[in-house]
Amino acid sequence: MKLVKKRSKRGYKGGATTHQTQTKYQTHQNLPTNCRLLSVKTPRLHRRNLLKPLLTLHFYLKQARPLFPSSSTLAPRLLSAFRRAGRLQMAASTAPGLKMAAARPCISSPRRFIGGAAAFFSAEPRRASWAKLTSACHISSSQPFQRCFLSSSSKSDKGVVKAMSESNDKSVAGLPIDLRGKRAFIAGVADDNGYGWAIAKSLAAAGAEILVGTWVPALNIFEMSLRRGKFDESRVLPDGSLMEITKVYPLDAVFDSPEDVPEDVKSNKRYAGSSKWTVKEVAESVKQDFGSIDILVHSLANGPEVTKPLLETSRYGYLAAISASSYSYVSLLRHFLPLMNPGGASLSLTYIASERIIPGYGGGMSSAKAALESDTKVLAFEAGRKHRVRVNTISAGPLRSRAAKAIGFIDMMIDYSIANAPLQKELSAEEVGNAAAFLASPLASAITGAVVYVDNGLNAMGVGVDSPIFKDLDIPKDEH
């Protein structure tokens, strides 16, 4: 379209000097037949870029009247607001393939005619390209005629609006967990069916880079399984991609430094071929390789006499459980804190046996979990004051992991939980992983020193409702 512009100035009005521009546009002789002229007012705006989509919006509002009666008053309101400010003739043609979903602009005054409205469209595959348009329209992949809208007040009389197109806007509505640019070290991942693996997957799904520390005797099998693709099915993330583990470090969190390793362990063939696997050495290796981390996860525990009642547990068995399951977290945090960026987060895993009697969970393991929860609070204070790092622990319900099967009654505990927990379902590792991702994210920036229960609510129960004592009570049950 060829436009010829003529301008003239008016004088004074009411004692105040006002310069108004009167503009006339003369269109070229070869103007397309599907264009129409409309009188609108947009002072000091980028007229062509703004009005073309607004006129298109006006056209589709008319089409949407049968579906949304409330939109029938919008077109007159838009045009009235535009006309009150002046005159501008403009040609516009509509783009095929778009279906109106909903729109509700905020018209606060004639000079602030749109306070910032977002109209959501869904487009057919043959739609026209809208990437270069500057408008208040958000081209979305929502279903046709889905009623959703956003509105906000404008802070500028110029009505600055941003262009957003489906081709370059991949944002998701809601409150997403975003860990892009973060790096996590998860200690205690040796297979693909434990909580450590689930936490790694959830952190990876949120965008974090994953480093893992694997118990030295299990390192070769774990790395071989990764290389041969045995874990590929378990590595699938919600978007269909595979979780990538940037590096696997050998780790035995029972030993802080090489000086602590006894000769019988050094000479053990299961440790042959591995080096720098104490906590101090692993922290130094991570620092050398990556410089820093943002998230530290402690997902390991061991009690050599876990099947023994506490009264039958030896001093060695008791202290071994404390060392591997509780102090190992203190040691990890002590050596990794200098690597952690301010605002980082650290997590561990505990169990309800720390505060409730769980027969069969012996060998000092209940004491180790109680110590872990107590240490969480103290570490939260010290790490928060010195390094601005948050420290929390997740009390997870029973899971059929390889480590839990060693206890011998994990199936019984899962059945008990399903029968007695407020939520009658089996707990999944993914649910614990998602809770960990939340606690590691900025969304939990004010949560530290907490024990977070992820157990379908079993921790809240005082009695087992499946007991015959309650057979005459009308206790609700999930029949599904």
Image (spheres, rainbow, N blue to C red):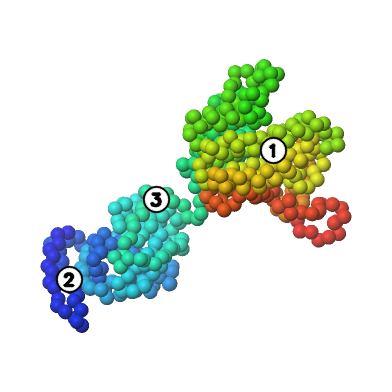
3D distance between C-alphas at marks 3 and 2: 37 Å
Whether residue 239 appears in this view of the structure is no
Name the side, left or right, on which 134 lies relative to 387.
left
Lower sequence index among marks 2 and 1: 2
Q: Which secondary structure lies at badge 1?
A: helix
> Badge 3 is on which residue?
169
**In the image, is 208 to the left or to the right of 415?**
left
Residue 404 seen in the current view = yes
Report x, y in % for residue 259: 64, 23
Q: CA distance from mark 2 to mark 1?
A: 77 Å
The amino acid type of the residue labelled 2 equals Thr
Residue drawn at point x = 51 percent, y = 54 percent: 175
Residue 262 rendering spot, x and y as whole percentages:
69, 21
- Name the mark on residue 21: 2
Residue name at image x 66 percent, y 47 percent? 377
In the orientation shown, which residue stands out farthest toward the bottom? 14
Q: Position of residue 459 (x, y in %)?
A: 73, 51
Q: Which residue is mark 1?
A: 326
- Label whose residue precedes the other's in the sequence (1 or 3): 3
Which amino acid does the dot numbered 3 rest on?
Asp
Which mark is in front, 3 or 2?
2
Location of the N terminus by quadrant is bottom left
Comparing 122 with 190, the one in front is: 190
Element under disc 2: loop
